[in-house]
Image: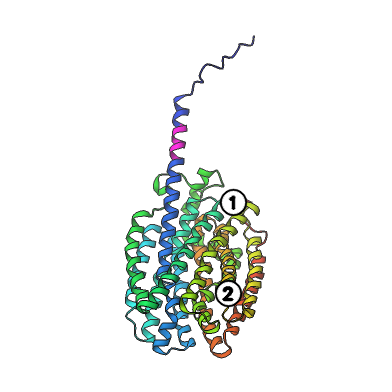
Amino acid sequence: MNMPIDDSLPLKVSPQTQASSAAASDTAERYQYWRMRVMYSMMSGYALFYFVRKNMSMATKSITDEFGFSNTEWGMVLSAATIVYAFSKFASGILADRISPKYMMSIGLLLSAGVNVIFGLGESLAFFTVFWALNNLFQGTGMPPCSRLLTSWFSPREIGRAWGVWNASHQIGGAFIALAAGYLVTHFGWRSAFWVPGLVTAIGSFWLMNRLTDTPEAMGLPPIEEFKSDGAPPSAEEEATPFFTMFKKHILTNRWVWIVSVANFFVYIVRIGILDWAPKYLEEAKGFNLKEAGFALSGFELAGIFGAYASGWLSDRVFHGRRGPVSVGFMLLLIATVAILFFVPNGQMALMGLVFIALGFLVYGPQMLIAVAAADFATKKAASSAVGLTGLFGYLGATLCGISTGWLVDHYGWNGALALYLGSAVIGTLLLLLTWKKKSPLLN
């Protein structure tokens, strides 16, 4: 016989179910708190790294004019620094997979700040070369800890958007220092553009050490894959695998990591060429003053915030974890925009500003997605090492860019440098086209 059910009676929930529900709610709340804290700490910290690296571009013309350095000589200063940064970033990527990202990032920032204060005392080409290279040695400790934290706190299906949000730290730091350093150089001389950011960043490094944390597991939380039910966390067997064995499996023999790393070589020629040389180019070739050049470069950086997030959102939501199609689309538009630079007349500040906004939007999309793709292809166990490898190739490209841009401008004018950037964008596009169908093995 069927018994009638009285819906008015409350359902009895076992103590075990109640405890499980309370524990899940507590875990979700703690995850939300720490993910927010990790994100704003990483963004603030990496923006501060830019305060004491991208201040150089705004001071370049004043330094070269005061000491009579040629473009080729100054290109050597930039290239020596970027090649040190390239290897530092790669070595830091390997270390970040093994040590605390919190201490690695904050101590590296403090050391970079100190070198900036010393750099402001410089009087010779040799001094500038040595100390800017030393600064870039410490600068390499900035991104790898962020790569590890991003892959630890965000799952493969959301990391494109999370990385896009974090990537705004590049543009926030770059845009702010372009304006601040431009003002400091104009009113107080080029040395102030190193002393003031150095002191501010030194204070910020202690704040970063207080705010930043390590992985979810270190905070007593489950791995992100378990929390989000998105793939499987590394097994106990994988955790016990010797580092070199893991490095060989996920990096040395992983052709997809190598493809995006080589592509980054060419993408960085375009990106760093604009960041390091745009103020000088706009002043010498287009009739801008230093403040106007600073505004144009700020537009480039701020537009990159939206470009990076848009590319991450598209790769997550529309292409379901495939970074290749979005990267290629952005790169094709970048090629067209670089070509426009050949035809913009002198003195057209508004038009040139719009072109720089487009360049920023388009170059920061693939630049960010290359790092995401490398982390995808290498999995969480070797994500920092993979991103470090892309950084190595990227800044080898930046090294070539520094030497080549100075030499080309001295011998062929600024159109020679633009031709280098255009050709690099084309080659980068062809390499990224190879990754069109590839995505994280966790999403296959």
Residue at 48% x, 59% y is 147
The image quadrant of residue 397 is bottom right
Residue at label 2? 352
Give the amino acid type for the residue marked by disc 1 in the picture: Leu
Q: Nearer the viewer, residue 413 or 255?
A: 413
Give the amino acid type for the residue marked by disc 2 in the picture: Met
Magenta portion: prevailing SS class: helix
Span highlighted in magenta in the image: 20-27
Q: Is residue 440 visible?
A: no
Between disc 1 and disc 2, the foreground one is: 2
Q: Tag 1, which secondary structure?
A: helix
Residue at label 1? 442
Query: Does residue 79 lie above or below 215 as drawn?
Result: below
User: Where residue 95 sits in the image (x, y, percent)?
Assistant: 42, 63
- Residue 23 lies in the magenta-colored region: yes
Mark 1–mark 2 Cα distance, whole angstroms, equals 43 Å
Residue at 60% x, 70% y is 263
Along the polypeptide, which appears first: circle 1 or circle 2?
Answer: 2
